[in-house]
Image: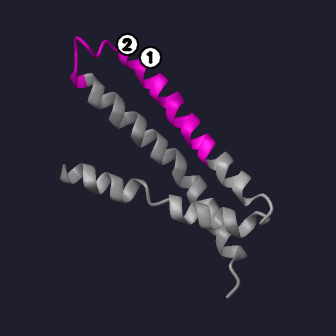
Amino acid sequence: MVAYYFEYLTAEVFFGPSYAQINKIVSGQIQGLAVAIFMLTGAFSGSLITYFLGYLGDYYDIKTYPERQGYLLGITVLISYWGCIPFFILNGIEYAKQIKY
């Protein structure tokens, strides 16, 4: 349970900076649309990966070998987080350029 707490504490921290950046770079007339597209993309991605994990679970027969479920979940989460790192770095660099001191 403690590990689960720290996972949520660290995994979901991108929402605030993402919304702040959307509000900073997008015109006030379309901020709602930009946030809605951001949230829709996130929801769609979550649904798609859930389907993909179900397919992989069937392929690797997790009903017979339940330990494989943890491996699949761990690997896909690591791949998705590692795949986000370059985009977060680039995003941070671009955002830093826009901040006026």
Is residue 37 found left or right of 84 in the rendered image? Answer: right
Q: Are marks 1 and 2 in contact (CB under 8 Å)?
A: yes
Q: What residue is rendered at 70% in x and 56% in y?
A: 32
Across and down, in percent, residue 91 comes to 63, 61
Q: Can you identify the residue that label 2 sits on?
A: 58
Q: Quarter holding the C terminus?
A: bottom right
Q: Left or right of 36: which side holds 72?
A: left
Residue 96, numbered label: none
- Residue occupying the point 42% across, 25% down: 53
Q: Amino acid at mark 2?
A: Asp
Q: Residue at x 50, y 36 (%)?
A: 46
Give percent across and percent down for residue 10: 37, 58
Q: On the rendered structure, is 81 left or right of 90? A: left
Crowd rating for badge 1 (residues with CA inside 10 Å; few <14, some 14–19, many 20+): few
Q: Locate residue 40, reporting x and y percent.
A: 62, 41
- Residue 20 as seen in the image, left or right of residue 30: left
The image quarter in which residue 44 lies: top right
Is 42 part of what is drawn in magenta? yes
Residue 11 on the magenta segment: no
> 12 or 75, which lies in front?
12
Q: Residue at x 60, y 54 (%)?
A: 87
Return the mark for residue 55: 1
Picture quadrant where residue 55 is located: top left
Three-letter amino acid code at disc 1? Tyr
Q: Can you say whether 4 is above or below 57 in the image?
A: below
Which stretch appears magenta?
Answer: 39-67
